[in-house]
Amino acid sequence: MKSIDNRKAFHDYHISDKFEAGIALQGCEVKSLRAGEGNLRDAFARVINGEVYLYNMHISPYKQGTHNNPEDPTRPRKLLLKSKEKNKLIGKVEERGRTWLPFRAYLLRNILKVQLVLAKPKKQLDKGVTIKKKQLD
C-alpha cells in the first residue's frame, strides 16, 4: 500500500505538531485502503465524550466485498490512542483556532496508522506568501 496523503494541508494550514494513531476499521475497509481507495481531503479529528474520532475520511467500498462493506464511506472512525496520548491531544486542541487534521494514512508492520497534525488555518495573504516562497526556491 502506498500512503494516502492530504496534500492541501500544508497549503491551507500552519502545521505545528505531528502525532500518530491507530484507526478502528470495519469489514473490508483495510483491503480497500491497501488498494489505494481512500481520501483524506476534507477529514478532521474531533473529541466526543473523551474519545477521538476521525470524520469525513472517505474509504470506497471494496469491489470484491460482500455484505460486510460499511454502507457509509465517510462514517466517523474511532482513533486508537493510549490515555496519556489522548489527554495530550485534547489539551492541545483546546487552544483557540486549532484543529487536528489527518495528514497521512499508511501501513506500519501490517497495522494501519494515521498521522495527525495540529493545524491552524492560514489567511489568504499567508497562502500567497507560501506560494511566492515556493516559487523562489
Image (spheres, grey):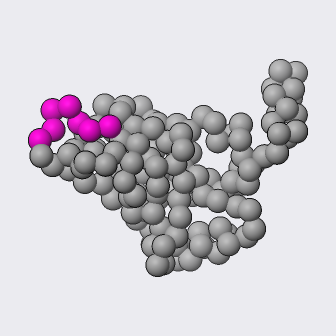
The answer to whether residue 131 shows anywhere in this view is yes
Image height of 46 relative to 133, above or below: below
**Residue ID at (11%, 41%):** 66
Judge whether residue 63 is colored magenta: yes
Q: Quadrant of residue 128?
A: top right
**Residue ID at (41%, 42%):** 58
Indicate the position of residue 102 as horizontal and vertical percent values. 54, 49
**Residue ID at (81%, 36%):** 127
Tell me the quarter of the image containing the C terminus: top right
Judged from this view, the residue extending furthest toward the left is 66
Indicate the position of residue 56 as horizontal and vertical percent values. 46, 49
Image height of 124 relative to 132, above or below: below
Indicate the position of residue 98 as horizontal and vertical percent values. 70, 61
**In terms of depth relative to the viewer, which is nearer, 136 or 44?**
44
Find the magenta span and give its range. Answer: 60-66
Q: Quadrant of residue 133?
A: top right
Is residue 137 found left or right of 30 in the rendered image?
right
**In terms of depth relative to the viewer, which is nearer, 72 or 98?**
72
Image height of 22 relative to 88, above or below: above
Judge whether residue 68 is colored magenta: no
**Residue ID at (37%, 54%):** 75
Tell me the quarter of the image containing the N terminus: top left
Tally the marks: 0
Which secondary structure is most common in the magenta stretch?
A: loop
Indicate the position of residue 121 as horizontal and vertical percent values. 74, 50
The answer to whether residue 137 shows anywhere in this view is no
